[in-house]
Image (cartoon, grey):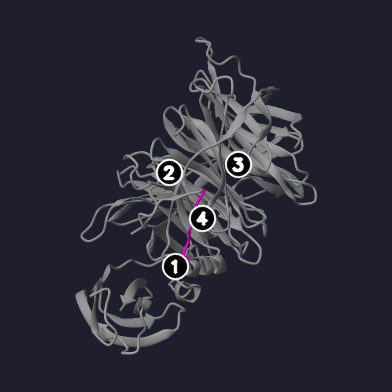
Amino acid sequence: MKSNLILRVSSLLFFSFLFTQICTSQLYENTIGNLAGSDETTDIKPLPNGHTAVLANTTSFGAKKILLMELDPLGHVIFFKTIYNLTNPDEEYTGTNLALDMSTAGIHIGYFITGCRGSYPTQMILIHTDITGNPTWAWKMDNGLIGITNHVMSECGVSIERQRNTDVIVVGRSDQMGDLRFTASRFSAAGVLLWSNRYSSPRGLQFLPNESCNGFRDGTEVVAVVGHIHTAGIGHTFLSCIKASNGLEIWRRQYVSEQYHDDGTDVVQNPADGRYMVVGHAENLGGGGTLMWAFNANGGNGALTNGATYSLLPPYHNLFARDVCLSPDKISGTIAGFVDIDPTAGAAGGVRTFIMKLPFAPGALPVFCHYFTASDPQLFLFGDDAIETVDGPNPGYVLGTEAILPGSAAGDYDVHALRLNVLGLQNYVDCPVVPFTPDIKEEGRSSNIKREKTASTWSNFIVAAQQQEFLENPCIEFVPPNVMDSVTVRASSSFETRIFPNPAIAGSEINIQFELPKTSVVEIQLLDISGKMRGSWKEMRDEGKQVMQITLPANAVDEMYFIKIILSGGQTQVQKLLVN
């Protein structure tokens, strides 16, 4: 599926025609990392200059370190730096979330990174770097000294929200002898602490935050924090609304699906009416696997307006939403997560990253929904699927997930970065996407939670950065945009296809084999490298395995063509064909 070509960053060797095509499209899919150790994605951000920043954690250079990299518009590495403790390189550093430092004039001048240092217990950290990834200042939340055996508090940052005046708000987890709370702290861009609190409940409820987003409530800037709340072993979703200026918590609510357990993993606000879309997962009490859980909440008081779970039929199961962003059209949320696939005849199983565009009305059908066959994220790991919207003249998305470089050991994951168009697609036939359709059930209810907070403090410390070696494994077989853009954008089932002989001879017959789930009109289109149609055939075919024969034009030149198969239900497949 993917080329086995391994590229070192120092050698940007591309075929000239490939370079021209990809520069035009500005879409890519690339795996980056090392054969020894894991390089696991945690966040991704588009940059104003068309580049992409990726945050990861790496064990490829000894103890776990934070990994920050910048990719050019083709998805290739500009810098690849680890951030760590210079005086104690064996101390673990974990990065969980990334934000851009932008000047008041809108110029990108650096990065903010949150996460934690140590193994257990850990200290929450906030690190600032310049635009090349070199640290300029760093702060840690005061929770005692790491390494003291009777130390009982462990904390870690989970998200950063950049404010309109260039300040940042850091949200984190706090665990004190099993008493789970969430934290929020505001810093200026220069690293001055403005306020910091730990948030809990007088009723002994436990809170585990996962993500946050900026928002507005009656014209006031707020931060919404989403995560997991549990007591007596039963867990559900919570959402908290905090005033950005002073850390005052305005409301906090619990949300319950009709399932045994649910969890909110990310949140985004609808700019039109102020409602929040929360996404996550729910566990079926009957053992039916993991369902995707999504709901809308009133921005004023947090009351649930509507919610739904999304499930799948075999061979799919475990539909798990990890991240959501506001879609380029600003009227939908676009979700990234993983889907677990059972092996079936002619198709490999495994865990794959999916993307789903969902209107701000959970319970509605997705606008599009498909998974990426070249991805290979870790099952049930929260941090390795991240998605952000790209605005501007070429809107779309950047998606960060994981895959495994050829030659890496099983379980050694690497960064997998994608630049997608507004339909959530890239233009590479060696890394195809597969659409799928979830079943939807409306459900959910919410209630208020009693709340309390205590102040917290931070202190500064020193970190260092170092450029490191790495490998790349990009998808390289480009599909012209006018071929790819006509692929179905609504959720639909996949079907397997095979073309033989391939390569073929101009003027000869080729066989196109496929299996239909039901009787359908089948249209075959032959497209050249520019996307121009060179032939079209249409027949009615019955359910089951079928073979259609077509005759290639005698004047077909030596090059790559595309066979596009379209079913009457809207399902589409594109396969490459080489002609000699």
Q: Is residue 450 visible?
A: no
Residue at the image position 37 percent from the left and 63 percent from the top: 430
Image position, residue 450 (x, y; %) = 61, 31
In this rendering, which labeled residue sits more in front, label 3 or label 4? 4
Q: For marks 1 and 2, give the CA distance.
A: 23 Å
**Crowd around label 3: few <14 · some 14–19 · many ≥20 (10 Å):** many
Q: CA distance from mark 3 to mark 4?
A: 27 Å
- Number of numbered discs visible in the structure rendering: 4
Q: Which residues are magenta?
A: 10-15
Q: Quadrant of the N terminus?
A: bottom left
Do the numbered discs 2 and 3 sit on residues whose CB atoms are within 8 Å?
no
Residue located beneath label 4 in the image: 12
Mark 3: which amino acid?
Leu
Q: Which residue is mark 1?
A: 478
401 vs 146: above or below? below
CA distance for labels 1 and 4: 17 Å
Cα distance in 3D space between marks 1 and 3: 31 Å
Question: In the image, what residue occupies the spot 53% across and 15% down?
Answer: 152
Q: Position of residue 227 (x, y in %)?
A: 53, 38
Q: Amino acid at mark 2?
A: Asp
Q: Are marks 4 and 2 in contact (CB under 8 Å)?
A: no
Q: Residue at x 52, y 51 (%)?
A: 295
Q: CB atoms at circles 1 and 3 under 8 Å apart?
A: no
Residue 554 in sight: yes
Q: CA distance from mark 4 to mark 2?
A: 20 Å
Q: Which residue is mark 3?
A: 98
The answer to the question of whether label 1 and label 4 lie on touching residues, with beta carbons closer than 8 A, is no
x%, y% of residue 206? 52, 28
As helix, strand or loop, the secondary structure at mark 2 comes to: strand
Q: Is residue 511 above or below residue 405?
A: below
- Report the disc number at residue 414: 2
